[in-house]
Image (tube, rainbow, N blue to C red):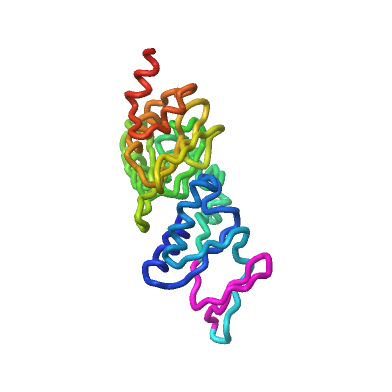
């Protein structure tokens, strides 16, 4: 999500910019076009123009190595004075290739941050960990997750098994006239439900086997605690997902529906 942070900084400084995106909308793996358009319009209002189906093939530089333009895979050229590139996470595991450590897009650890090698632990973005909430291996690039993993790793070194890593991460953006928050694993799951709940208000909840595994909130962030609680409790919301989209949703709404 660093790309939109950079775009928002340009907008806040009055710098006209173009945001080159590879897909049809921003963060297409977590947002539908309807939800993403709220973000697109907020960028445009600040002088940042989203460019879809684009990306960067290469940069053109002058004789001193200063960037002059970005050229996308379609051959479109965009002149610029500076450029920022959001490439996601790049895991530097090369130094571990000849070791017995198990690697799978990072260092594989259990829920106590221990690797497959005795007395070797790992924590942070580099880990592929056993996500107890998701029920499968997962990755997480948030600061809060990395900090908590470090805490669990330290405790496990002293008393293995004393505390497991069970974390619902979140990432918020406050650059615009409305807040934005993602939680859990909004790009995963086997089903989802979404709704526009008001002006510049939209939400989407990702589901797996009838349970909440992540989501995105735009505008109204009040349901975040309830959604995170459902994740931690592993509550099955099958047949009740419409309630998740109701303004003012709380976990008690589901409990009442269950009693009926």
Query: Which residue corresponds to the image point at 42% horizontal and 34% vertical from the top-left?
Result: 111
Position of residue 132 measured from the top left corner of the image (x, y, whole percent): 44, 31
Position of residue 187 measured from the top left corner of the image (x, y, whole percent): 52, 42
Q: Is residue 245 above or below residue 82?
A: above
Q: Is residue 53 visible?
A: yes
Farthest-out residue, top: 260
Query: Which residue corresponds to the image point at 48% horizontal and 41% vertical from the top-left?
Result: 186
Q: Is residue 140 above or below residue 56?
A: above
Farthest-out residue, right: 74
> Toward the viewer: 129 or 26?
26
Q: Is residue 117 visible?
A: no
Position of residue 189 measured from the top left corner of the image (x, y, whole percent): 53, 35
| Residue 90 magenta-highlighted | no
Quadrant hosting residue 169: top left
Position of residue 178 measured from the top left corner of the image (x, y, whole percent): 36, 52
Query: Which residue corresponds to the image point at 45% horizontal and 59% vertical from the top-left?
Result: 4
| Residue 69 magenta-highlighted | yes
Magenta part, dominant SS = loop
Quadrant hosting residue 69: bottom right
Tally of marks? 0
> Toward the viewer: 124 or 160?
124
Q: Is residue 69 left or right of residue 128?
A: right
> Toward the viewer: 91 or 78?
78
Point out the stretch of residues depicted in magenta. Answer: 65-84
> Toward the viewer: 162 or 243?
243
Q: Is residue 133 above or below residue 145?
A: above
**Quarter of the image where the C terminus is located:** top left
Query: Which residue corresponds to the image point at 61% horizontal and 62% vertical from the top-left?
Result: 54
Farthest-out residue, front: 199
């Amino acid at each position: 999500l660093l790309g939109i942070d950079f775009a928002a900084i340009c907008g806040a400084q009055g710098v006209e910019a173009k945001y080159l995106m590879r897909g049809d909308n921003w963060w297409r793996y977590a947002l539908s076009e309807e939800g993403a358009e709220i973000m697109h319009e907020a960028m445009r209002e600040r002088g940042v123009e989203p460019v879809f189906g684009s990306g960067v093939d290469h940069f053109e530089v002058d004789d001193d190595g200063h960037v002059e333009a970005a050229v996308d895979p379609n051959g479109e050229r965009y002149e610029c004075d500076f450029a920022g590139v959001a490439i996601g996470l790049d895991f530097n595991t090369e130094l571990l290739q000849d070791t017995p450590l198990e690697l799978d897009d990072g260092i594989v650890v259990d829920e106590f941050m221990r690797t497959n090698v005795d007395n070797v632990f790992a924590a942070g973005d580099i880990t592929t960990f056993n996500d107890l909430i998701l029920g499968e291996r997962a990755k997480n690039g948030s600061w809060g997750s990395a900090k908590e993993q470090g805490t669990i790793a330290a405790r496990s070194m002293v008393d293995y098994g004393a505390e497991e890593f069970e974390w619902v991460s979140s990432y918020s953006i406050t650059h615009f006239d409305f807040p934005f928050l993602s939680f859990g694993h909004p790009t995963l799951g086997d089903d989802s439900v979404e709704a526009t709940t008001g002006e510049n208000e939209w939400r989407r909840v990702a589901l797996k086997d009838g349970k909440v595994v992540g989501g995105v909130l735009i505008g109204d962030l009040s349901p975040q605690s309830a959604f995170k609680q459902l994740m931690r409790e592993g509550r099955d919301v099958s047949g009740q997902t419409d309630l998740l989209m109701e303004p003012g949703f709380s976990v008690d709404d589901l409990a009442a529906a269950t009693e009926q």
